[in-house]
Amino acid sequence: MDLKTLQSEIIRLKEEKDFCILAHSYVSEAIKEIADFTGDSYVLSVKAKGTDKKNILMCGVRFMAETAKLLSPDKRVFLSRKEAGCPMAEQMKKAEVEAFRRENPDYTVVAYINTTAELKTVCDVCVTSSSAVKIVNKIENKNIYFIPDPNLGSYVAKCCPDKNIKLFNGGCPIHGKIRVEEAREAKRNHPDALLLVHPECIKEITEMADYVGSTAGIIDYAKKSDAKEFIIGTENSIAEELKYACPEKHFYELSKELICPDMKLTTLPDVYNCITGQGGEEILFDGDTSEKARKCIDEMIRLGG
Ligand code: 13P
Ligand code: SF4
């Protein structure tokens, strides 16, 4: 089957089999074209909660499919490519959070949504990159343990100066490896361009940026801005998407290295195989995990809404 035929077949099958297809902005254009909704982690979790379809197919990484299942426990939720995981989500063990809690009972544990459902069972509230500042500001407790990304955590700390924020030593291996010298060089090469970066980049880079935000936030900012040139400091699929969306503007990648291999694993044939029951994985939890992890996500929706 050629690409267009495969896309038409998936569109037909998702209606026939009552599927809602959700795609993170980092996956390929071919998948985003057949998705019902695309967006950042927050947008996808809101769409997963709101859909009236019986089945949800997530094209992204495992924690996103887990979040969809926690929000819609009565629906069947599938991850289209079972190997697709976020390395940051696996960085911290449940026992480490439990030990922290025992030693620091006066702290609220705030988990970035890029964590496993198992880890969420021992946290108080989740945040996404687009909702983190708003949610942390709304938490009554001054003492916050922010896990696992210290880059997003220090950005939140800068925006919420009244909070006492402890950080864990994790982080995104893709955004976190971009060095400040690369950002300086990009700015030297494109002196008129605005620098738009994801808060998973190191502190020295977010401090240089004209805008810091989630993937959806960066897309929105670039589309609405009167500026004509932008350096994009997040996964390179966003610069590509913006080049198509705004052909009159210029977009430059902050680094050629900004490619998430896990987000690139899922292909259009994977989506077809999953929807036809020949691949992918259904996300299932035991009742205890579901109930405890869901509280953390519900709190995110309550405080973030
Ligand atoms: P967003 O919350 O911006 O979608 O980010 C998810 C992610 O994995 C970024 O690397
Ligand atoms: Fe995880 Fe980083 Fe990939 Fe996002 S870009 S999914 S945080 S590894």
Image (tube, rainbow, N blue to C red):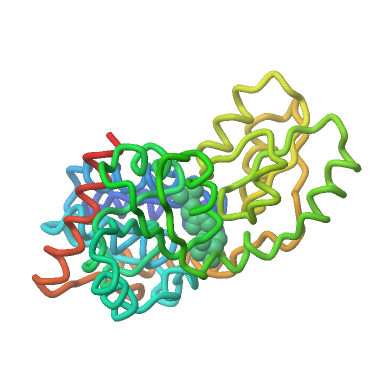
Q: Quadrant of the C terminus?
A: top left
Residue 298 in picture, x, y percent from top left: 20, 49
Which quadrant holds residue 17?
bottom left
Q: Is residue 85 above or below residue 130?
A: below
Q: Pick the residue in front: 220 or 10.
A: 220
Q: Give the quarter of the image for residue 227.
A: top right
Residue 188 vertical placement versus 89 (above, below) = above
> In the image, residue 2 lies at what x, y percent?
56, 59
The front one of 199 and 235 is 199
Q: Going 40% across and 58% down the picture, which residue do you hit?
A: 146
Q: Nearer the viewer, residue 99 or 286?
A: 99
Image mark count: 0
Q: Is residue 31 visible?
A: no
Residue ID at (50%, 39%) = 159
- Above or below, 50 against 96 in this view is above
Between 267 and 106, the one nearer to me in the picture: 106
Which residue is at 21% across, 47% downward? 299
